[in-house]
Image (tube, rainbow, N blue to C red):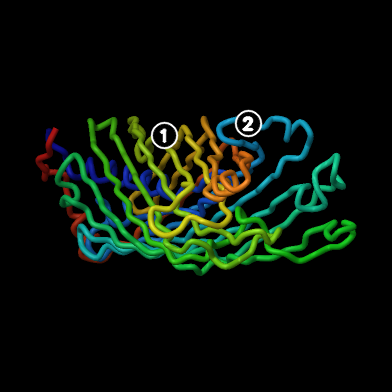
Amino acid sequence: MTLNFKRSFPLIGILCFVLTVNFKSHAQGCVAIRGFSSCNGNIINGGSNLMKGDFSVGTNIRYFESFRHFRGSHEETHRIEEGTQVINDSYFVDIAFNYAISERVYATFLLPFVSHVRSSMYEHGGNPPNGLGERHNTRSSGLSDIRIGLGYWLFKPNTKSFNYALGAGIKLPTGDYSYMDTFYNQGPNRDRDELAVVDQSIQPGDGGLGFNIDFQGYQMLSDSFTLTTSLYYLFNPEETNGVLTRGGRSEFSVPDQYAALLGALYFPKIKGVSFYLGGRIEGVPSSDLIGGSGGYRRPGYAISVDPGINYNTHNLSLSLNVPVAVERNRTQSFLDKQRTEETGVYRHGDAAFADYLINFNLTYRFRNKKSAMSHDMEDGSVDFNTIN
């Protein structure tokens, strides 16, 4: 199989862009995944369509509303029927700066911002019939945890029908992890308004210094179809961040995070357009791989079907993905298991999940003069041998 460089270059660019978008997803609800990876933007900006010295800036905007409560994989439908469900409206804006150190080594700096609105009854006097039955909001916003990363392509880009990248990075505890807001109907008589820390799911940061590893790549099956994959794991060695929950019974945990994505791209005969369809699983484990697992966390995972549409020009890329959840599971936490052993009474907390996530990405590439001249002079007559 041979690939015409002029023809395959935009195709690979679109592919890399889609992988970038997928690798910036968030868990949809109270199971708090705040974003990944530390190498956000690394495929498009550090891979096949970034040449040495090229630089890119990308913006990723995400939104979801979580409101369906799960305990294990069982949905507690009575929460919506009774009107006692917790509703999180969450907005995320990531600004990613990417630089190709060489044709195979890339660096990324991610500046993330968040804004959350959390509506509930149980936090403001209690759910009826035992509570006041008044619904109020708590809010949080600001800078989240900054990510810095490096990645390396295993093969020279644009010379094969496949390539794979290994990445690693660090997560800095720059986001506020003790954000406070007003809670209503507090105190023994439920007649006071009190300032207290907001729920863990809407804290801008997790308070821990973490590091991640990731693996991602693609396999071009033909001019029309390409397979893609992304694997990610964030290690948070710190057990807790020192901030007590609003109830004061335990500190917030600093949990690990993980994600795995597998999908396919279809390239119709429409210039610059591609379609994506894949599956993903993302979540928070009950126990960390490194360090302790104590403290308060809501572990769980969501499995989603992930359709998307993409448009790519010479230097500008746009993408829209809408992952739709097909399975949600709030697993038993480490603290749940401890208290079950101590009391002999089975404990298993719940969490709210969203039905879908809206994910929009815009990236612009700045070419250095040498790579721009090389690309502009390319007349399509050079073929690269590839492996079927």
How far across and down, in percent of the image, does residue 273 sit? 38, 38
Q: Earlier in the sequence, mark 2 or mark 1?
A: 2
Residue tagged 2? 75
- Viewer-nearest of discs 2 and 1: 2
In-image side of 56 versus 102 (left or right): right
How far across and down, in percent of the image, does residue 118 sit? 69, 51
Q: How many numbered circles are shown?
A: 2
The amino acid sitting under disc 2 is Glu
Is 55 rendered above or below residue 329? below
Quadrant location of the N terminus?
top left
The amino acid sitting under disc 1 is Gly
Q: In this view of the protein, which residue sits in the foreground, 200 or 12?
A: 200
Is 110 rendered above or below residue 297? below
Disc 2 crowd rating (10 Å Cα; few below 14, some 14-19, many 20+) is: some
Residue beneath the point at 49% across and 64% down: 145
Quadrant location of the C terminus?
top left
